[in-house]
Image: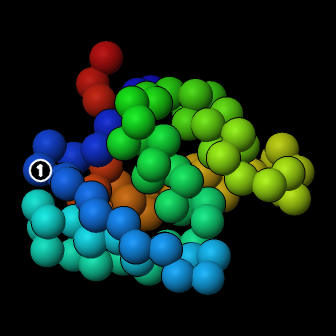
Amino acid sequence: MRWRLGGLTVLHWQHFDGDWAVFDSGSGQTLAADPVLAATLMALEGGCETLGDIEAQVRADLPAELDAADLLNRVEEALAFVQQLGLAEVVAP
């Protein structure tokens, strides 16, 4: 399965004490994001497509405070959430 940002998604970032506010000018949505959600979106924005690549990039970007299983779970939840919002989509093979 491959992932990408939605076709009209253009993200603008603001950092506040460990959390992020993300504005998508394509949809007009503003999203409050914890570090895992923000790093997941940033990985997609940077061109990561597979779950493994996204998870590896999130792991590289965040402090090593989460164990591997917990981080993978949180990245999967973040991907499902942004897909539900229309900010990301699964790419057909």
Question: Residue 35 at x, y = what percent?
Answer: 61, 65
Q: Is residue 16 left or right of residue 28?
A: right
Look at 71% across and 53% down and name the residue there: 62
Of residues 50 and 42, the one nearer the viewer is 42
The answer to whether residue 56 is above or below residue 67 is: above
Question: Residue 15 at x, y = what percent?
Answer: 49, 74
Give the SS element for disc 1. loop
Disc 1 marks which residue?
8
Question: Residue 57 at x, y = what percent?
Answer: 61, 37
Q: Quadrant of the C terminus?
A: top left
* Dot 1 crowding, Cα within 10 Å, few <14, some 14–19, many 20+: few
Q: Can residue 82 be seen in this view?
A: yes
Q: Which colour scheme is used?
A: rainbow
Of residues 59 and 2, the one nearer the viewer is 59
Q: Is residue 77 visible?
A: no
Look at 63% across and 76% down and name the residue there: 18
Q: In this view, does 75 lie to the left or right of 1?
A: right
Of residues 22 and 7, the one nearer the viewer is 22
The answer to whether residue 51 is above or below residue 22 is: above
Q: In this view, does 2 lie to the left or right of 35?
A: left
Residue 70: image quadrant is bottom right
The answer to whether residue 32 is above or below residue 49 is: below
Q: In which quarter of the image is the N terminus?
A: top left
Amino acid type shown at disc 1: Leu
Residue 23: image quadrant is bottom left
Question: Residue 77 at x, y = what percent?
Answer: 56, 59
